[in-house]
RNA sequence: GCGGGUAUAGCUCAGCGGUUAGAGCGCCUGACUGUGACUCAGGAGGUCGCGGGUUCAAAUCUCGUUAUCCGCCCCA
């Protein structure tokens, strides 16, 4: 029996991991400038955490959660999204006591949804996220969108579309839902039972449909923005103003409704045209009711979750990340008598922070050079009887094939001063050894 | 959950009823006993995704299954 990774999951192999590190460190560096601090939450949570917040009519909670009973009889769910666990932790550890507004971020948190996999859609994927807790200001909404936009910009995604919408307060959505159902009454009556139920469960989703029937029927449908309360209208206008001031191009898109039920007022998504059917790079919005729903004080909040796998797909074509070399230097034993010294030099360099390799298996010089080449090391440090006698190293630049001598003590001293690359190995004695 | 395509060497793919299943790239060895990458010569590597069926004969046809890709749905 040969095992393979479960359907919809992927191994992230060493040849790929630098791309993840690049995204993660770019993200952490960016959000640190806004004052976000990282939080890590468990992979699984109490099932009710998600049914309470995401809403039991949502597709995610309804059919996509990985839910099971543990040996203690508890209902456990692998996290299907990142916000609710972060809010649970925020309440549980009373982070509100530390300051009025709290900025949390998370990197590469695994997210599980039972879906039919295709490109850019997995059963386990990973998200980066930001949560700005404790501010009702439209500037908070704009900050989250700005950070998201900047991240993609810095990472080199150019074919980017920012879509924002406001879905208002509960009352607005209730009224609008009614209006929408009223408007599509004739169409709904014609639908198959299953389709009708689906539409009735969340009427807003009809807006997003690609079905010509819906598109036609909804062409002259009322807009949610017409139903917004004055307060929500003003908020949405201010968010747009703030985005414009930040120089972020966006479009108001009435069809953005989001899959989770906890959002109010601002919702947004960023799409990349290079992604095919699964074009959403991230989604987020304001969720003022979540913390109260989870037993905390009423606390307005806004946040975003960004899918890493989709981001990496978009980057592949638009902004590939160069593969860093495995090693900086490789020490070659030209004679067997040099092997102990080779090991000693490798150890000295490693202690001084230089990624250094050498042959463990008694390979001949040719094999050692080959290994040096494979390792990506720019420099081979050759050590044989001549070098042992003269206490120097023969250094070869594997890219240019130049070769020179340098006293061992000088190399170590340079490494001690923190020098790297050319400065570390460049010789003051450019004589060739052959 | 629905519809369709694909699965052959480490990778990209050809072969589509009939000798021993191939190519390019990669890998290993040698030419070169202290020099990789380039060149030349040689070599290793395959349950043809898996299981059943049809046939004298199956990588090839067929059914099932698993994975993957595309569209729908949903979303990151």
Image (tube, rainbow, N blue to C red):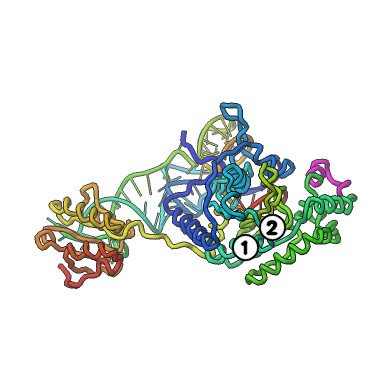
Q: Which numbered marker is on residue A24?
A: none
How many badges with numbers are in the image?
2
Region of the chain picked out in magenta, as a range? A187-199
Residue A192 magenta-highlighted? yes
Tell which circle, 2 or 1, labels the residue nearer the N-terminal end: 2
Tell me the quarter of the image containing the C terminus of chain A.
Answer: bottom left
Give the label, 2 or 1, closer to the camera: 2
Badge 1 crowding class, 10 Å Cα cut-off, few under 14, some 14 to 19, many 20 or more, is many
**Residue drawn 61% across the image and 32% down it:** A68
Furthest-top residue in this view = A72
Q: Which structural element holds mark 1?
A: helix
Residue A367 magenta-highlighted? no
Residue B24 in the image, given as x and y percentages of width and height: 40, 58
Asked whether A204 or B73 is in front, the reply is A204
Residue matched to label 1: A143
Furthest-left residue in this view = A389
Report how far apart the C-alphas of labels 2 and 1 lie in the structure. Answer: 12 Å
Residue matched to label 2: A136
Q: Is residue A41 above or below residue B41?
A: above
Q: Main secondary structure of the magenta part?
A: helix
Horizontal relation, residue A83 to residue B41: left or right: right
Badge 2 crowding class, 10 Å Cα cut-off, few under 14, some 14 to 19, many 20 or more, is some
**Residue A389 image-quadrant placement:** bottom left
**Residue drawn 26% across the image and 65% down it:** A417
């Amino acid at each position: 029996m040969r095992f393979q990774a479960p359907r919809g999951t992927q191994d992230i192999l060493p040849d790929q991991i630098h791309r993840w590190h690049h995204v993660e460190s770019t993200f952490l560096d960016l959000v640190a400038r806004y004052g976000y601090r990282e939080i890590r939450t468990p992979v699984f949570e109490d099932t009710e955490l998600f049914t309470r917040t995401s809403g039991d009519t949502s597709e995610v909670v309804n059919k996509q959660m990985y839910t099971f009973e543990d040996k203690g009889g508890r209902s456990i769910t692998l996290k299907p999204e990142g916000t609710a666990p972060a809010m649970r932790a925020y309440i549980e550890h009373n982070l509100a006591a530390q300051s009025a507004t709290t900025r949390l971020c998370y990197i590469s948190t695994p997210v599980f949804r039972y879906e039919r996999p295709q490109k850019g859609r997995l059963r386990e994927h990973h998200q980066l996220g930001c949560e700005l807790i404790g501010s009702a200001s439209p500037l908070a909404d704009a900050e989250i969108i700005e950070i998201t936009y900047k991240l993609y910009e810095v990472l080199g995604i150019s074919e980017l579309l920012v879509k924002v919408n406001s879905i208002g307060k509960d009352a607005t959505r209730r009224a609008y839902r009614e209006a929408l159902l009223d408007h599509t009454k004739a169409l709904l009556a014609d639908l198959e039972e299953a389709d009708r139920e689906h539409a009735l469960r969340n009427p807003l989703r009809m807006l997003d449909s690609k079905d010509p029937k819906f598109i036609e029927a909804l062409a002259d449908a009322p807009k949610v923005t017409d139903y917004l309360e004055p307060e929500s209208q003003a908020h949405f206008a201010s968010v747009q103003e703030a985005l414009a001031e930040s120089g972020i191009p966006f479009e108001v898109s009435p069809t953005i409704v989001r899959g989770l039920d906890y959002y109010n007022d601002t919702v947004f998504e960023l799409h990349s045209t290079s992604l095919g059917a699964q074009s959403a790079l991230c989604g987020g919005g304001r969720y003022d009711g979540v913390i109260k729903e989870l037993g905390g004080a009423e606390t307005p909040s806004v946040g975003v979750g960004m899918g890493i796998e989709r981001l990496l797909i978009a980057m592949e074509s638009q902004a590939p990340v160069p593969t860093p070399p495995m090693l900086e230097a490789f020490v070659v034993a030209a004679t067997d008598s040099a092997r102990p010294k080779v090991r000693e030099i490798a150890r000295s360099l490693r202690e001084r922070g230089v990624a250094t390799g050498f042959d463990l298996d008694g390979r001949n010089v040719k094999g050692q050079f080959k290994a040096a080449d494979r390792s990506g090391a720019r420099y081979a440090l050759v050590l044989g009887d001549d070098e042992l006698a003269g206490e120097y190293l023969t250094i070869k630049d594997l890219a240019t094939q130049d070769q020179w001598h340098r006293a061992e003590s000088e190399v170590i001293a340079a490494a001690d001063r923190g020098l790297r690359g050319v400065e570390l190995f460049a010789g003051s004695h450019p004589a060739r050894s052959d």
